[in-house]
Amino acid sequence: MIRDITIGQYYPAESWIHKLDPRVKIMSTLIFIIALFVANRYIGYAFTIIFLGTVIYLSKVPIKFMLKGLRAILVIILLTVALNIFMTPGENVLWSYKFITITAEGLYIAGLMALRLIFLIIGSSILTLTTSPIQLTDGIEKLLNPFKKIGIPAHEIAMMMTIALRFIPILLEETDKIMKAQMARGADFESGGVIKRAKSLIPLLVPLFISAFRRADELAMAMEARCYRGGENRTRMKQLVIQKQDYIAIGVISLFMIIMILIRFI
């Protein structure tokens, strides 16, 4: 399950989505997330399925690889659905027993919340799967450049965000290795109650934190050895330029947002 998390990973391919400007992809992802919270009807999520299916097809990322990331949040999805089913009040009671009541409104909201979480993970994964770390850093830095006037270090923030994203799959792989090593020594992470499982994670968390700090120290030393001084006087081999396909992508995501607003209010 640990290796199923796709956020932070990059899938190299020659696709139309990969060639888009990273600034456009970042802003499109933000607009997509806002659109998900604007939608409050199933017909809106039907358009979302069509939109995401088209984007995934154009990105040339295997659909199995994309859906694999949902396994890691399956527990969160099920918990969200359960909470909405049993805790949403409504007039149309479908089943009731003592203090437990299931209503039609609860089922409706639970389905919307489950779809929203699924689309949120898939939409966020598309950004990192189709954008290399260097492009992602440059894109975030360019978007934060206007805030330099008020003293915000745009390059440093972009670098930290990109390193954090790239460390996710690395730390997950390290966690998997440590877990298998501990299981080979007789550690049990699955049996027992909640308290026993929490205690069994201590042999896993201690070496994981040590490994994370060691990697961070090695990265800092490598950056200092290469005379890294932040974004000051930095040059780039490839300059970010908005091209024709980027304008098309902006138009498509804007149309998607307008449709979601119209579905909600009309």
Image: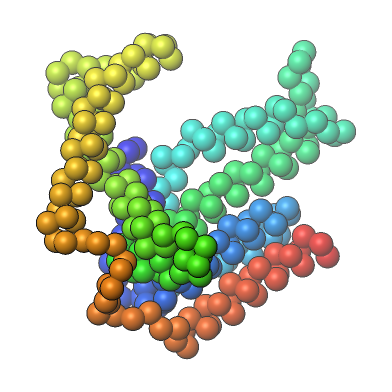
Residue 184 figure quarter? top left
Residue 255 appears left or right of 262: left
Most distant residue in the bottom direction:
244
Most distant residue in the right direction:
91
Q: Which residue is drawn at 73% across and 42% down?
A: 108
Q: Which of 40 and 167 is in front in this view?
A: 167
Q: Which residue is drawn at 81% across and 62% down?
A: 265
Q: In this view, does 103 lie above or below 45?
A: above
Q: Which residue is drawn at 77% across and 13% down?
A: 98
Residue 192 appears left or right of 260: left
Q: Position of residue 27 (x, y in %)?
A: 52, 67
Q: Residue at x 29, y 19 (%)?
A: 202
Residue 46 shows in the view: no
Count of picture labels: 0
Q: In this view, does 19 lie above or below 132?
A: below
Q: In this view, does 5 lie above or below 139?
A: above
Q: In this view, does 88 lie above or below 136?
A: above
Q: Where is residue 41 in the image (x, y as percent from the top left)?
A: 73, 54
Residue 173 figure quarter? top left
